[in-house]
Image (cartoon, grey):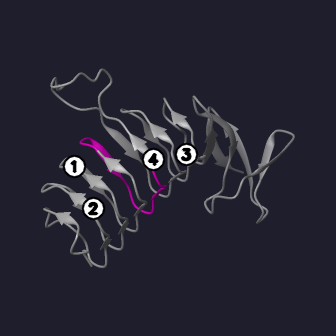
Amino acid sequence: MIHPTSDVKTIHIGVDTLVWQYAVILEKAVIGSHCNINCHTFIENDVIIGDNVTIKSGVYLWDGITIEDNVFVGPNVTFTNDKYPRSKRYPETFQRTIVSKNASIGASSVILGGIRIGSFALVGAGSVVTKDIPDYALVVGNPAKVVGWVDSEGNKLERKDDKLYAKDGKVFIIENNILKSI
């Protein structure tokens, strides 16, 4: 369903994707199936969105952004794609940003260009992400820092001694900033 007040130029939209009021999607954008593109969003040409993605209101996706499958992007999340922006001066290429599968980004967070947000990572609301985020990391603050780890359901893991424990009894360790099941 594409709402009649939206301005959708692309034909590359998967099945059962919803595009709500006042969304603007440019011609070369690619959007997967079963997505929910909320009202008052803007998606540029060099943007790829996977399947089962939710883009909440007030989000603008600029050239160079890839959103993989099952990602949640909260309301008013701000992405950038130019490290040294100047009016009417454009870089030869824009920075590439990847939001990996199953990641969630909380409301009003800022994601600087050239960043990779890891799979299953959780960005707390209002965070300013200035560097890559590992898979399963929970980050908050300005600049965003790892304050914990989450499981594949987004539940915070509990730290005891040198191990992390999930609610389902699974046990993990952190090696070289990578969450590993033991």
* Pointers 4 and 2 in contact (C-beta within 8 Å): no
Front: mark 3 or 4? 4
Q: Which region is colored magenta?
A: 62-76
Front one among 171 and 156:
156
Residue at mark 1: 44
- Distance between the alpha carbons at the discs numbered 3 and 1: 27 Å
Q: Does label 3 or label 2 sit earlier along the sequence?
A: 2
Say which quadrant the N terminus sits in: bottom left
Residue at mark 2: 23
Residue at mark 4: 77
Residue 48 drawn in magenta: no
- Distance between the alpha carbons at the discs numbered 1 and 4: 15 Å
- Distance between the alpha carbons at the discs numbered 3 and 4: 20 Å
Q: Does label 1 or label 2 sit earlier along the sequence?
A: 2
Q: Helix or strand or loop: what does disc 3 sit on? A: loop
Front one among 162 and 45:
45
- Distance between the alpha carbons at the discs numbered 4 and 2: 15 Å
Quadrant of the image occupied by residue 138: top right
The spot of residue 51 in percent (x, y) is: 35, 66
143 left or right of 95? right
- Distance between the alpha carbons at the discs numbered 3 and 2: 30 Å
